[in-house]
């Protein structure tokens, strides 16, 4: 579904991504893992058309998209739920969700809204509240729900567990597993290594803008190099 070859990108002449190569297959969860500052958010921006690639190719569903603007990428069905939620605090929960279908999914807006509210009963209870009055966990639900309103073919989730309580983190990973079980292809970008590897099919570890490790998630979870370098285990 997504094929990345030799991807390079950065800011103001400073290269952050240094020739990334990876693929995301239809129906899988790919976990992209790494500490702060290794290039995860830069990768998401490049895939989403927010940041231009300086070199390399990005192909989505057979079409090269690395020169596309962000609205066209959204229209193709590659939907990015950004780190930090980025909801509209002065708009209601309902209006935040409706905005998710601005570029894609208008025809099925009512049906998709019901699906999102079934997934997140707490959003249904707060449908008329302003987004800024929600708790952190509820705002994360709203951000993901807004992404689902666009009928994603591939959903990129950038640090969805960041800042959540342990109980809400567990709920978030259960939700990701459920969405994938419904057939949604997901690229999960996280610092939470252990839980991400538990639900992912494949994973890659970024270090200094390059892929340090990649493979099946179950195999990486038992890789001595991963445990030593990223989990502090000997």
Image: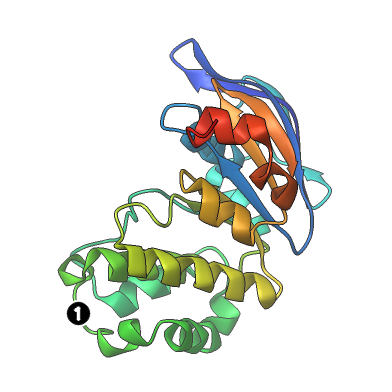
Question: Please, is residue 91 above or below residue 76 in the view?
Answer: below
Q: Quadrant of the C terminus?
A: top right
Question: Please, is residue 5 above or below residue 44 in the view?
Answer: above
> In the shown orientation, is residue 153 left or right of residue 116?
right
* Residue 54 spot, x, y in % from top left: 62, 19
Q: Is residue 148 visible?
A: no
* Residue 68 spot, x, y in % from top left: 64, 39
**Residue toward you, 52 or 206:** 206
Give residue 166's quadrant in the image: bottom left
**Residue toward you, 51 or 170:** 170
Circle 1 is placed at which residue position? 129
**Residue toward you, 14 or 68:** 14
Q: Is residue 169 visible?
A: yes
* Residue 35 spot, x, y in % from top left: 45, 33
Q: Secondary structure at mark 1?
A: loop
Residue at figure coordinates x 56%, y 25% from the top left: 207
Residue at figure coordinates x 53%, y 51% from the top left: 194
Residue at figure coordinates x 54%, y 41% from the top left: 44
């Amino acid at each position: 579904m997504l094929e990345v070859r030799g991807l390079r990108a950065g800011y103001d002449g400073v290269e952050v991504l240094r020739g990334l190569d990876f693929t995301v297959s239809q129906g899988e969860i790919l976990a992209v893992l790494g500490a702060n500052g290794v290039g995860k958010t830069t990768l998401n921006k490049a895939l989403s058309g927010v940041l231009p690639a300086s070199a390399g190719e990005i192909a989505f569903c057979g079409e090269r998209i690395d020169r596309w603007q962000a609205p066209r990428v959204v229209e193709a069905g590659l939907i990015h739920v950004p780190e930090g939620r980025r909801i509209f605090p002065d708009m209601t929960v309902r209006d935040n969700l409706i905005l998710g279908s601005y570029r894609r999914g208008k025809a099925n807006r009512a049906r998709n809204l019901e699906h999102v509210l079934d997934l997140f009963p707490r959003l249904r209870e707060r449908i008329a509240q302003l987004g800024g009055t929600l708790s952190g966990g509820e705002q994360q639900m709203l951000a993901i729900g807004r992404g689902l309103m666009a009928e994603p073919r591939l959903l990129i989730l950038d640090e969805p567990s960041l800042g959540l309580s342990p109980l809400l983190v567990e709920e978030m990973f259960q939700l990701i597993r459920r969405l994938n079980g419904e057939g949604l292809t997901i690229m999960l970008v996280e610092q939470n290594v252990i839980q991400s590897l538990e639900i992912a099919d494949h994973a890659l570890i970024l270090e200094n803008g390059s892929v340090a490790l990649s493979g099946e998630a179950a195999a990486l979870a038992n890789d001595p190099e991963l445990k030593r370098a990223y989990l502090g285990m000997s």
